[in-house]
Image: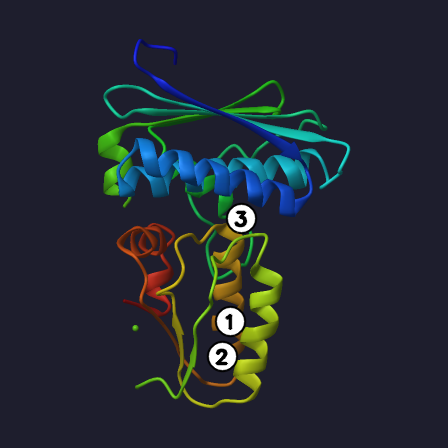
Amino acid sequence: MLDAGSRAFHGSSDARLGEVEALCRRFRAFLAAETGRGMAFSAELVAREALINAAEHGCGHDAGRTVVLDAYVDPLGTVELLVEHDGAGFDPPKDRSRPPEGLTERGRGLPIMQSLSATCTWERSGKLVRAVLSPKHGEENPMERAESVYEPEDDLTAATVEAARAELMATIRKSSGTLRIDLSNVRMVDSKGIGLLIATYNSLQAEARSLEVTGASDEIRSLFKLMRLDRHFTVA
């Protein structure tokens, strides 16, 4: 997408998780200056899922492998994303639009990408992902009282979930009744973050306890509804 007036982003990193996270944060800053809030959330999340998928499944988080993100925002606000990697190719599942049935931790990255994009295709044996987000599509994709509260101080993404998991498990062990997770400080939740919430819900259910998620932004609430999480725990 090289129309007159288009704004472009180019970034790359090695396939280590921390470096990919830094690339996503740089892209976030670009989107904040170039698009509205809803589109910025959707475009970052689609790019993030594609980059993490490439780094994990294509490159095995190898420091010697590279992932590349190119993005273009045209004058009408349409965003085109190109994510490439130099690792091994892979075959994405044929049905990429539906999230998995039940509360499994994995398997939601590709449905997120497909659902938030007007078009999303895999090329060159999975080494290139091309996604287009239209303004209308992007903007449309914009919980007994809690006896204990967990309030993460950062986003719930692939780079942060293990630290958050340890904190959540400690909170569960020290508490009883409903657990409320306050997402007031969280701007981004990716498929790994969703997996963490599902694991937390499953742990609480095993103890006949419930989960509430509060403080979520409009975009995160829409994402949770898209992934059907609101069928299992309260999201507000």
Position of residue 94 measured from the top left corner of the image (x, y, whole percent): 52, 32
Mark seen at residue 107:
3
Q: Quadrant of residue 52?
A: top right
Which residue lies under the disc numbered 1?
Answer: 200
Label whose residue precedes the other's in the sequence (1 or 3): 3
Q: Disc 3 and disc 2: Cα gap in Å?
A: 21 Å
Which residue corresponds to the image point at 47% horizontal and 90% vertical from the top-left? 176
Query: Dot 1: what SS?
Result: helix
Camera sees residue 9: yes
Position of residue 95 measured from the top left corner of the image (x, y, whole percent): 48, 36
Using a 10 Å C-alpha cutoff, classify the residue at mark 3 as few (fewer than 14 neighbours), some (14 to 19) or many (20 or more). Answer: some
Camera sees residue 116: no
Position of residue 21 measured from the top left corner of the image (x, y, whole percent): 57, 45
- In-front residue for pair 95/45: 45
Q: Disc 1 and disc 2: Cα gap in Å?
A: 6 Å
- Residues at badges 1 and 2 in contact (C-beta under 8 Å)? yes
Which corner quadrant holds the N terminus? top left
Query: Dot 2: what SS?
Result: helix
Which corner quadrant holds the C terminus? bottom left
Which residue corresponds to the image point at 47% horizontal and 68% vertical from the top-left? 152
Question: Tag 1: residue type?
Answer: Thr
Mark seen at residue 204:
2
- Depth-wise, is mark 1 or mark 3 nearer the camera? 1
**Total label count?**
3
Looking at the picture, does residue 73 appear above or below residue 158?
Answer: above
Query: Dot 3: what SS?
Result: loop
Label whose residue precedes the other's in the sequence (3 or 2): 3
Position of residue 30 measured from the top left corner of the image (x, y, whole percent): 40, 34
Question: Tag 2: residue type?
Answer: Leu
- Residues at badges 3 and 2 in contact (C-beta under 8 Å)? no
Q: Quadrant of residue 22?
A: top right
Mark seen at residue 59:
none
